[in-house]
Image (cartoon, rainbow, N blue to C red):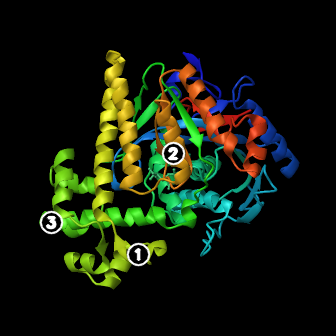
Amino acid sequence: MASKSGNGTVPASMVGDEHVAVQKLQPDAKIYERLMSLGGFYREQYGVEPEFYVRVPGRVNIIGEHVDYCGYSVLPMAVEQSIILAVGTNKQVAQLELHHLDEGKFQSFDCDLNDLEIKLPKTGGPAWYSYFLCGIKGIQEELEAKWRPVGMRIALSGNVPLAAGLSSSSALVSAAVLATGHAQGMHLDRKQLASISASCEQYIGTHSGGMDQAIAYLAKQGCAQHIEFHPKLKGTPVTLPTGSCFVVANSLVQKRKAASSDYNERVVECRLATRWLAKSQKLPNWKEFIRFIDLEEACHLDNAAYVKLIEQQLKKTLYTREDICETLGITEQQLETDFLTPSTQHMQQFKLRQRALHVIQESGRVVQFRQICEQLQRRSSKQDIEQLGKLMQQSHHSLRELYECSHPDLERLVALSVKQGVSARVTGAGWGGCIVAMCDSVKAASDYVNVLKKEYYAQLPAHLLERYQPNDFNEVVFATFPSNGAELFVQ
Ligand code: NG1
């Protein structure tokens, strides 16, 4: 049966299926106009038609923050905003030619595909095209000795807000992986593509988990996904409560993760806390543990027992380098080489207890959230819906207090939400970016958005008002519905 997807007409059975099927682009597809205008830009740049188009969405995470790199599951959905590419191949020269539609802001780039180099500056964060290069490198590594690159001409455009916790960077990396794989004639399934994209994004220097790349490929229109990473990558569709409507509100505080050490500092603290707890359990192989989930499995811990273990074994608020070296029996140099990443070499103190508590409790909230959504499919219950809201509030509280990744402007947005009886939380890595809020109905969402527009957005500084007010702030605060994962189109 053919069903109308958000972005093209595809058989329902194929959306989110194993491979990214090549779809014929239909003029009534939502993405049609954007792709056509990018196609026009491609023709201007290269004088020929593109051979295919790629669309990879951003995402909003409903619950499960800062747990993916510890092995725990998350519950995101893809948003409508996406990175799109128009792609052509050049069999004569193994050259990458990359043009961004927004040329004024994103300078064009080209390089020899046999001589890829991802340069990371010491300060200021990577150049935009470095994310694209990560994706190409991912395919190069997959092919190893069989890497005989055909040249690629690319035109690119994106409307995922940048540095806002909606995964613009992973959408770009994942789009590069999909385009390169397809151009090289590879037949990778969605999970392989997601794994390659997650591994190669690490070349940008962030030791992230695999949430963003997984949802980029596994998302299905109309539902969120419960994504598990352990023992292997798995996505299970989760139907969100009937009538509920999720709103994304961008604080407009930009957080460029790759230009700061905050994210990697949390990763380091989680790894150290895991190792510390593994030692406390006298596991013979305690020196191998760096992910909370592996320790949970080895010690057969349930969520409550894990919390208790953390409370018993990690009593201090702050641990010094000396504390850690003494307990783990390592030298400072080993601490630096085995645990600290290039951007976290400066770390002197480590908040093991609160980071561990956040991760373990948040992982429990994800499981509960999914279970409640499933119950709600069988029978609707006001209490269950309220419980979902509570889980979102607890998540936010924990991110602010234990993980310390909120921001005063995010707090203002959350406070405005609370005042209206709407549950909201920071989404994505935090320190800026967006909140996600759950409203009971489309009407409630529209009222909520109007209040935010009046009380938050209309108060923005002049330069931001100038930019976003003409479009009534619709780019920065909007209701969002789950969209499809990565797609490939031909005309
Ligand atoms: P953002 O910064 O929101 O795209 C990051 C990580 C995720 C996950 C979240 C926090 C990257 C590419 N993504 O997402 O893996 O850890 O933070 O839950 O770094």
- 124 relative to 27, above or below: below
- Residue 61 image label: none
The residue mark sitting in front, 3 or 2, is 3
Q: CA distance from mark 3 to mark 2?
A: 42 Å
Location of the N terminus (image quadrant): top right
Residue at image coords 58%, 40%: 249
Q: Residues within 10 Å of mark 1 (few under 14, many from 20)?
A: some
Where is residue 66? Give x, y as percent: 40, 52
Q: CA distance from mark 3 to mark 1?
A: 23 Å
Residue at image coords 27%, 61%: 353
Q: Secondary structure at mark 2?
A: loop
- Residue 188 image label: 2
Location of the C terminus (image quadrant): top right
Provide the residue designation for mark 3.
280
Q: Amino acid at mark 3?
A: Ser
Whichever of callouts 2 and 1 sits on the residue coming sooner in the sequence is 2
- Residue 184 visible to an observer of this rendering: no
Where is residue 281? Give x, y as percent: 13, 63
The residue mark sitting in front, 2 or 1, is 1
249 vs 256, nearest the viewer: 249
Q: Amino acid at mark 1?
A: Met
